[in-house]
Image: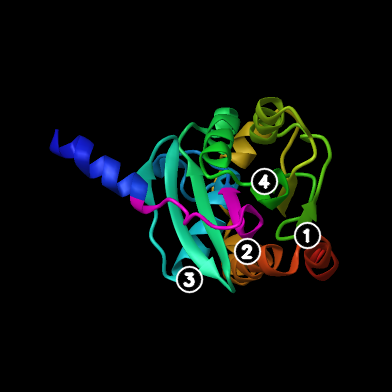
Amino acid sequence: MFQFIKAFFSTSKQRLPEIDAMKKFLIVGLGNIGLEYAETRHNIGFKILDFLAEEENFVFESAKLGTVATFKYRGKSILCLKPSTYMNLSGKAVRYWMEKEKIPLENILIVTDDINLPFGTIRVKTKGSDGGHNGLKDVQNTLQTSKYNRFRFGVGSEFSKGKQVDYVLGKWNEDEASALPERLKKSADLVRSFVFSGTKNTMNQFNGT
């Protein structure tokens, strides 16, 4: 009973205040739960949100279908979500928190890895295919639209035929690991820009950098 009460208050504390829906944002970092996945390329969505949490001084707490945290930025209220559904079922968590907090689709940003971009390249798109990414595929199928904002972080494609899964579930090499802090800083800046300056301005400022 104590655990239930604790979980109830933990979840309710992380809810966004009742404000104008256009001032509410949902930032979703895709990844897989578990220590074995923590430093893998596929978990860059989790890693970017963790870096943002350090900079903005907020803490993730367990909630339904993931861990969540809220913070304020320049008058905007942001809910950050790391789904606990594993990558291939990410859409369920996205839809739940989107509907629970009544956040409009245009105020949602999905953060994910992308093998079609060189390592460290960052790019925001407002629509498009899933590009073979199972997390994006489930988000698209669940929301029934391909018109949602996605922040793609390039992880490169240095793998031989048939080794894609091993590559994205593999850990960063030495060069990538040393370059990652600067890229995480840039990524956190991109998220803040998306919230405050809007999608188009963010695309103009950050795409390809």
Residue 8: x percent and y percent?
Answer: 28, 41
Who's the residue at 65% across and 27% down the image? Answer: 142
Q: Residues within 10 Å of mark 3 (few under 14, many from 20)?
A: some
Residue 52 included in the magenta stretch of the image: no
Q: For mark 1, what is the residue?
A: 199
| 16 to the left or right of 87 | left
Residue 20 included in the magenta stretch of the image: yes
Q: CA distance from mark 3 to mark 2?
A: 27 Å
Q: Which mark is residue 56?
A: 3
| Residues at marks 1 and 3 touching, judged by CB atoms closer than 8 Å | no
Q: Secondary structure at mark 1?
A: helix
| 64 to the left or right of 104 | left
Q: Which mark is residue 175?
A: 2
Of the residues shown, which amino acid type is indicated by label 4?
Pro
Who's the residue at 42% across and 45% down the image? Answer: 67
Q: Secondary structure at mark 4?
A: loop
Q: Nearer the viewer, mark 1 or mark 4?
A: 4
Residue 4: x percent and y percent?
Answer: 22, 35
